[in-house]
Image (cartoon, rainbow, N blue to C red):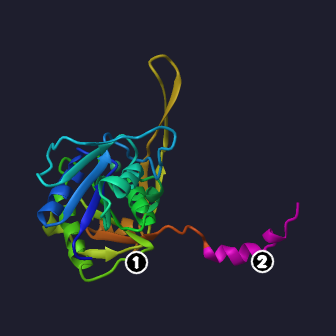
Amino acid sequence: MNACKILLTNDDGIYAPGIIELANALHGAGNEVTVVAPDRERSSVGHALTLNRPIRLWEADRGGYVPGVHLFSCDGTPSDCVVLGVETAAKETNLVISGINRGPNLGDDLTYSGTVSAAMEGLILGKGAIAVSLNCQRSDTVHHYPTAAGVVLRILEWLRCHELSKEVLLNINVPNLEKEKISGFEITRKGLRTYEGKVTQFRSPHGILSYWIAGRPEDEMKEGTDVYAVAHGKVSITPVHLDMTHFPSIERLRQDGLESLRL
Ligand code: MN
């Protein structure tokens, strides 16, 4: 991949610090960057597309973006942004990057993540696709977005001489550390992350029973997984493909007679 025409989006909103840091770094490295990003936070919307109302795209105020970055705000989801970007505002796109997300996208976060879903949409539209997230927690006072932006630049340099498979996106998670403290890059598989205490019950001021979905992440620390790599200070790179078919089950379900059912 030589001249990089990048469509950049996220799910934290167009003025989130992660996407601004990455846009400016990509532009500074000589790439043509078009940002098409949601006008508000859309974390955890997954791969949703807006089909039941019109959506708009408009030239956004520059905010913290350097001159030269093309800027469009959208009142749709992250995946809407990728569709509109590729089809209208940035037709020449050869790479879709989503991030830098505030917080990790590890283990089964992938299925909820607006960040990773936007990269999936890029892949579906035939583009190279990268999702990048910073492994920071709500309690962290410093967010090392420059470290994550530096990681993306290194990977783009690597991509000048190597081809990404058309069936695979890269899901990158970067430890929330200064770049000198990163212990390396590791190719990983999706780990296991479950959430404890997922539902908190409370009463609204009007006495109505209500619920808040959140929870503490609990990781299964197995070597070779994304959760393990970032916990050990490494940049985790997981190749993700969209075919969710569990191939071994095809034969097994046949053998167990599931195809022999008759109505
Ligand atoms: Mn987010």
Q: Seen in the image, is 160 located left or right of residue 38? A: left
Q: Which mark is residue 165?
A: 1
Q: Can residue 198 be seen here?
A: yes
- Is 29 inside the magenta-drawn segment? no
Q: Is residue 99 visible?
A: no
Mark 2 closeness class: few <14, some 14–19, many ≥20 residues within 10 Å = few
Point 26% across, 63% down: residue: 6
* Residue holding disc 2: 255
Q: Residue at x 47, y 59 (%)?
A: 108
| Residue in the picture at 14% in, 46% down | 64
202 or 43, which lies in front? 43
Is 203 rendered above or below residue 115? Answer: above
Q: Element type at marker 2?
A: helix
Q: Amino acid type of disc 1?
A: Ser
Upstream in the sequence, badge 1 or badge 2? 1
Question: How far across and how far down the image is residue 170, in percent?
Answer: 36, 69
Quarter holding residue 214: top left
Residue 253 position, x and y percent, is 74, 72
In magenta, the rendered stretch is 247-263
Q: Secondary structure at mark 1?
A: loop
Residue 263 as seen in the image, left or right of residue 24: right
Instruction: Identify the residue at the far bottom of this view.
Output: 161
